[in-house]
Image: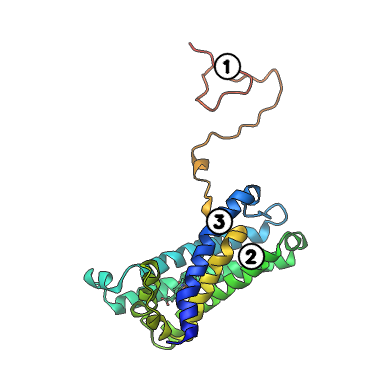
Amino acid sequence: MTAVDNFFFLVFPYICLTTFVVGHVWRYRYDKFGWTTRSSQWYESRLLRWASPMFHFGLLGVLLGHFGGLVIPESWTNALGINENVYHSVAVVLGSIAGIVMVIGLVGLIWRRRSTPAVFRATTRMDKAMYVVLGTVVALGLFNTLYWQILAGGYNYRETVSIWFRSIFYFNPDVTLIAEAPLSFQLHAIAAFSLLALWPFTRLVHVLSAPVGYLWRPYVVYRSKDSHSQPGNRDPRPGWERPGLTPTKK
Ligand code: HEM
């Protein structure tokens, strides 16, 4: 274990996690109106229509896989009768599919951003840095799965990388474990933590503001101002009243 290992696998993760938390508080306090995806659907929607769902659904699969592989200890899946061979086969098939779908979506999104002048003009310097780091994380992750797990016969990262990952959150990082993992696993983890540090200063803040209330709020109803239009004789539900009209009680 060298000083470089200690920096990247002990100090750096905490710098990034702290920046992630403090950065979000700062951004929320000082840039509430800039808290947005900076949507560019207005400028281009043909590529966005397939690239965005592919990227986001692929990402969802990848993150579920990371939860299973990094957060859930190997001993738990063993106790459920899922041995390393079964786990490995399922993880490789599902991980490869999700990773490839995500990469195709990401390539589509970056191509769209570069090839549509209006979208490119609306891309900030911070966004460009974020796309480079995100692309690096995804490329290294997919390399780990396709090269190490398929071509090289398999690497059980649940005995090294995953234990180190969890140990960060117990505030007792076991650097020796990640230090013995293949370089591409180490670089993938460093790139992923760098992405967390950039997160609050980019459009990625939108991830923390899923519009959940949107599912239940009343529709925004557009009506003509035509005085002849009849509102009907049924009382509207609360929140659905016609502007300017008070509900009549029968
Ligand atoms: C420190 C955090 C992370 C660690 C320790 C980590 C670790 C890993 C490991 C061990 C694999 C190989 C999985 C396998 O072969 O079965 C992997 C694959 C992958 N990772 Fe990560 N990862 C992290 C964060 C991320 C993030 C934030 C993203 C994307 C935004 C990401 C994207 C991917 C992708 C696309 C793959 C390949 C597809 C897959 O197997 O799911 N990773 N990662």
Find the distance from the CA under tag 1 to the CA under tag 3: 43 Å
Mark 1 vs mark 3: give the one in front.
Answer: 3
Q: Looking at the picture, tell me which residue is in the foreground, 193 or 84.
A: 193
**Residue identifier under label 1:** 246
- Say if 183 sits above or below 132 in the image: below
Find the distance from the CA under tag 3 to the CA under tag 2: 25 Å
Task: Tell me which amino acid carries mark 2.
Answer: Leu
Q: Looking at the picture, tell me which residue is in the foreground, 96 or 28.
A: 28
* First reached walking from the N terminus: tag 2 or tag 1: 2
Task: Tell me which amino acid carries mark 1.
Answer: Thr
Residue 4, numbered circle: none
Find the distance from the CA under tag 2 to the CA under tag 1: 48 Å
Mark 3, Cα crowd under 10 Å, few <14 / some 14-19 / many 20+, is some
Q: Is residue 143 visible?
A: no
Residue 123 relative to residue 248: left or right? right
**Residue identifier under label 3:** 24
Q: Is mark 1 within 8 Å of ligand 1?
A: no
**Residue identifier under label 2:** 109
- At a point 40% along the width and 77% down the height, the residue shown is 161
Residue 55 found in image quarter = bottom right
Residue 240 found in image quarter = top right
Residue 39 found in image quarter = bottom right
